[in-house]
Amino acid sequence: MVTEDALRMLKPKTQPQRFQAAKDFLYGLTGYQFVRHAQEMKHEAESLFFIATMGDLVGIPVLPPIHALRLLPYFAPEIARWKRQLARSREFWEKEEYDLHGV
Amino acid sequence: MNALIAVVLGAVTVYLTYTRYARRIDRNVIQSDPKRATPATLYMDGVDFMPTNRNILFGYHFKSIAAAGPIVGAIVAATLWGWLPAMIWLIGGVAFMGWVSDYSAIVMSVRNEGHSLSAVAHRLISPRTRTILFLFIFFYLLLVAGAFVGIMATVMESQPRTHLGMILLVVMGLLLGQMLYRWHVGLIPATVITVGITLIAIMTGHASEGFFSSINEAFNALTGGTPLVTYFDPTLANFKGAEAKIMPSLLFWAVAISLFCYAGSVLPIWRMAQPVVYVGFWITALAMLLGLSGAAIGTITKPEVAQFQIPMFKGWSPEMGPAGVMPLWPMLFVTIACGAISGWHALFGSVGTARQIENEADMLPVGAGSMLAEFLLGMLALLAISVGSKGSPVAAFANGLGGFISVWGFPLDYAVSLAFAAFIVIVLVVTQLLFRVMRVTLTEWLGDMIPPLRNQHFASFVSIALAILLVMTGTWIYLWQLFGAANQLMAALSLLLVTIWLVSVGKNWVYAGIPMILMYVTTVASVLVTAYNLYFNVYLPNLAAGRMIPTVGSGLMVLVAILLVFAAVFIGIDGFRAFFKYLGKPAPSASRAAAKG
C-alpha cells in the first residue's frame, strides 16, 4: 500500500489532471448541489412508483398490477437501494417537509 | 503591519498545519486506509450515501460550512480587543483545534457507519446525552438565527444602498430555480443571467439609495418619527451605553427578512432556498476573491488601502462602562468562532459530508482542507476591518473590503456596494436555512408532546417569533457572543465525542482531548460571563424602567444561557464517565468492530 501511494505521488501530474481537480472543485462548489437534488427528486418519484407497483415487497398491501412482472427486470437492480432508502425515511409521503437536503 | 504580510502569514499557517500536523495525525493516529470500505460505498442509495470524488466533495463541504461566522466574528473581535489577539486566535485556533474538530467528526462518522453525532453519543455515552444534545442544538440555532436577523435588519435599515440588490437576489433566486428545474435551462446560461442581473443591481445600489431612504422615511412618518420601542443598550455609543430606538423602518425590514426566511423554510428546497443560496454564493465568492487578491497586490500598487488602521491591542479587559466585563479570556475565543473552530462544521460534516466520502484517504483533504480554507475567509475579514476604520464595525468591514476590490480598477462606490452586499448576502442565505433546520429540530424535539408543532408552518412561525423576540432586546453583541459560545461549545462536545470514540477503539486521544478540555472550559466560562452581563446590564435596567419587550427578550437570553450551561455540564459528566469506562476497557467487540470498520 505504501509503495502504491509513493508511486502515485512520484508520478508527474499532467496538465489536464491538474485542471480536472480545479474543475471538480468548482463543480462541487456550484453545480453538484443541483445534481444531488435532482437525483433526490428522481428517487422520490421512483419510490412512489415502486410503492404503487411493488409495494408488497416492503409489506405495503398493494395488489401488484399485471404489468409489475414485466417491469421486474427493470426494477431488480434498484430494489436493494430502494429498500435501504425506505428504511431510513420517516414516512415516505412527508419527505420534503422533514428532509434538510444536506443543509 | 500591512495586508500582504497577513496574507502570507495565512498561507504559511495553512501549509504548515496541513503538511506538518494534520497529515501526521491522519497517518499515525487515525491510520486512514484507502482500501477500507466507507459507508458511502457500503450503503449507497444514490441520495444520502453517495461515493463522491474528493475534489467535488471539498468544494461542496467548503460551500456548506463557509457562512457569516468568520466574517462577523472577526469584525466584532477586532473592534473589541484589536487586530493582534484576533489574528493570533485565528491562526492558533485553526492550527490546533479547528481542523481537528472538522476532520475528526468526519472520521468518527465514517468509522461508525455514517452515524450522526447524536447517534454516536447515544451509543457511546448514554441515551440521555442524545436528548440533551437535541435541546442544545435547538437553542444554539435560535441564538444564531436571532444574531443574524438582528444584524441584517440593522444593516438594511441603515444602508438603503443594499436594498435593490437584496430584492433582486430573491427574485433571481426564484427565477434560477424555475429555469433549472422546470424550464431545464443549462446551469451556465442560467448562472450568467441571474448572477449577472443581481450583480448589476448590487453594484449600482448607491443610485437607488435616495428612493429606498424615502421609503424608510415614509414608514417612520407613520408614527410621526416616534420609535416603536425604546430600551437601554449598554453596548451603544462605543460601550458608553445609550437609549436605543426601534423605528418602524427597522421593524419593517425585520418582518421582510422574516417573511423571506419563512418562505425559505416551508417552500420546497429547489423552489427558493437552494437557488437563492447559489446566487448569493457567487456574489460573496466574487467579492472575497477580488478582495483577497486585492489585499495581496494592493500593498504594492495602492498602499493606502492596505495599511492597518485600527489599534493592534486594546487591552486584556477593555473598559466597557455599563456594558459590563469583556475579558479577552474567555470572550475572544467565542467571539471568533467559525474561522478558528466551529461546532456547525462538525454537525454538518458528520451527517452531510461523511456519507459521501468515497475513500478514507479523502477524509483529510475534505475535512481539514475545507476548515483551512474557511480560516482564510476569516483572515480576509480581519484584514478588511483592520484597514477600513470608518463607521460602525460592519461599515468598516465594507469600506475595507471595498478598498481592496477597488485595487482592480472598480470605482470605490461600486466596490463598497459590492462589499456591503457580500456581507448581507452571506448572512441572509444562511438565515433562511437556519430556520429550516430549526423547524425540523423543533418538530423532532417537541412534535410528539405538542402536536401542532408537527405542522411546518406553525413550527416555522414559532421559530421566527422567538428569534424576533431576541432581536428586540437590541443588545446584539451579547447575542452574538452567546451564539459564539453555543457554537464553540458544540465543537467542544463534538471533540468530547471524538475523544471518547478514540479511547473506545484504543487509539491515542490526546490530539482531540486537549483542545476539547480547553474549549469546554473556555466556552462554559464565556456563557457565564455573557449571562452575567445580560442580567446586570440589560435585564435589570430595562426591568427597572418597566420596558416589557427588552426585559422579556433579555430574560429569555439569560434563561437560554443557563440552559446551555446545564446541558453542557450534563453531557460533560456523562462524557467523562464514558471516557474513564473505555479508558481501561475498550468498547464491546460488536461496536468496536463497527467503529473500526
Image: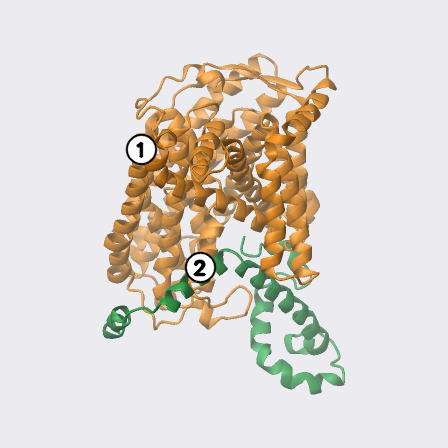
* Residue B555 pos. (x, y %): 54, 25
Q: Identify the hue of chain A.
A: green
- Residue A25 marker: 2
Asked whether residue B470 appears in the rendered view, the answer is no
Left or right for B157, reference B596: right
Mark 1 and mark 2 residues within 8 Å of each other at the beta carbon: no
Q: Quadrant of the C terminus of chain B?
A: bottom left
Of all chains, the one bearing label 2 is A
The residue under label 1 is B2
Q: Residues within 10 Å of mark 2 (few under 14, many from 20)?
A: many
Residue lying at 55% horizontally and 58% vertically, measured from the top left: A33
* Residue B224 pos. (x, y %): 72, 14
Residue lying at 60% horizontally and 34% vertically, measured from the top left: B205
Mark nearer the viewer, 1 or 2: 1
Mark 2: amino acid: Phe
Q: Identify the hue of chain B.
A: orange
Mark 1: amino acid: Asn
Residue lying at 56% horizontally and 63% vertically, measured from the top left: A36
Left or right for B273, reference B377: right
Left or right for B158, reference B224: left
* Residue B94 pos. (x, y %): 33, 44
